[in-house]
């Protein structure tokens, strides 16, 4: 039973970590090589990995999506989708998809004269599910080896940890003061009741035994 | 614009739940503190009256109004985020 408990707790924190990893912004340094637009079918469960840029798009089963293709300094391909998040989840409030597409096209460069940019994005790339991270911002950087410090994530994760800890400490204090004594009380009276029944049964047995022939 | 409406409604509900919860919690903490002060200050006068007076002062305090930040801070953050993501 103890293992089941730990597995459930582990799965819970794994889900929290996956959720944060999907939702929080990350930055890649890439060279943008091309952009394209492709019709996407959005009528299966992987719909949750695509945006709802406006109200109509919630019911549409396929639509055109913009993509930005990049290559990392190591030569690995990175493909991003470029969609508005609008007012829905995750709360990036991105409305400037067309502007970002223009910036991406402006930043296209060749291998010989590379122009490095940092692409801020959230989400996951998965080849089997055909899902793509959503690009949020493009900033030019000095070179492929620039060190980017994720201040936003540091602040958000610190605040989140502080909040969880504050609630957890208060909940534990509350439990120790209010709930544990009550449970102990109930246990005590249960034991007392159990002992009383035991005693009575003992007496009954003795009485029954007295009728047995010796 | 339905998306905006949904955001506003969901956020308002969450904010109201948080506001009520925080208000009740904060008042309970203040009540406990007042009771402790009364013990420490030598237990002069009626305890109930001391706590009641303290809570009345707390109800009018700036500290309590800070909890209203639950309603304002998220909207400010959203406005800043919209500016940074789209116009900067």
Image (cartoon, coloured by chain):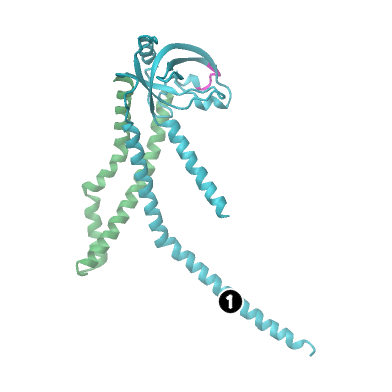
Chain colours: A cyan, B green
Give the camera-side residue of B61 and B77: B77
Residue at x 32%, y 30% (from the top left corner): A149
Q: In this figure, which residue is indicated by the disc labeled 1? A: A195
Quarter occupied by residue A209: bottom right
Q: Is residue B12 above or below residue A61?
A: below
> Depth check: B85 or A26 in front?
A26
Q: Which x, y percent locates residue B64? A: 26, 48
Q: Nearer the viewer, residue A86 or A40?
A: A40
Q: Residue at x 37, y 16 (%)?
A: A100
Label 1: few (<14), some or many (≥20) within 10 Å? few
> In the figure, A94 relative to A35: above or below?
below
Residue at the far right: name it: A213
Residue B18 vertical placement versus A189 (above, below): above
Q: Residue furthest bottom?
A: A214
Quadrant of image for the N terminus of chain A: bottom right
Q: Chain of mark 1?
A: A
Return the x and y of residue A70 as percentages of the image width and height.
43, 16
In the image, what residue occupies the spot 30% across and 51% down? B26
Q: Position of residue A164 (x, y in %)?
A: 38, 46
Q: Which secondary structure type mostly characterizes the magenta part of the structure?
A: loop
The residues colored magenta run A58-62
Q: Identify the secondary structure beneath mark 1.
A: helix
Among the 4 quarters of the image, the one containing residue A25: top left
Task: Provide residue A51's location: percent of width, then percent of height.
Answer: 47, 23
A73 inside magenta stretch = no
């Amino acid at each position: 039973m103890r293992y089941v408990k730990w597995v459930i707790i582990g799965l819970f924190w794994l889900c929290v970590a996956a959720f944060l990893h999907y939702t929080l912004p990350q930055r890649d340094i890439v060279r943008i090589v091309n952009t394209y637009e492709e019709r996407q079918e959005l009528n299966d469960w992987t719909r949750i990995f695509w945006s709802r840029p406006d109200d109509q798009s919630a019911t549409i089963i396929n639509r055109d999506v913009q993509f930005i293709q990049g290559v990392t300094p190591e030569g690995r391909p990175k493909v991003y989708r470029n969609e508005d998040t609008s007012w829905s989840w995750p709360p990036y409030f991105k409305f400037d998809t067309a502007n970002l597409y223009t910036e991406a096209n402006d930043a296209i460069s060749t291998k010989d004269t590379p122009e490095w940019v940092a692409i801020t994005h959230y989400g996951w790339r998965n080849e089997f599910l055909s899902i793509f991270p959503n690009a949020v911002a493009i900033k030019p950087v000095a070179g492929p080896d620039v060190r980017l410090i994720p201040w936003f994530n540091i602040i958000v994760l610190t605040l989140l940890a502080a909040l969880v800890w504050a609630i957890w400490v208060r909940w534990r204090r509350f439990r120790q003061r209010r709930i544990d004594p009550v449970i102990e009380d109930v246990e005590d009276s249960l034991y007392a009741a159990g002992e009383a029944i035991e005693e009575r049964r003992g007496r009954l047995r003795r009485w029954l035994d007295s009728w047995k022939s010796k | 614009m339905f998306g905006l409406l949904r955001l506003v409604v969901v956020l308002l509900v969450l904010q109201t739940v948080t506001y009520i919860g925080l208000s009740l919690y904060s008042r309970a903490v203040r009540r406990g503190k007042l009771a402790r002060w009364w013990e420490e200050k030598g237990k002069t006068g009626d305890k109930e009256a001391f706590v009641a007076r303290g809570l009345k002062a707390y109800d009018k305090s700036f500290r309590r109004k800070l909890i209203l930040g639950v309603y304002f801070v998220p909207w400010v953050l959203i406005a800043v985020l919209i500016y940074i993501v789209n116009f900067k």
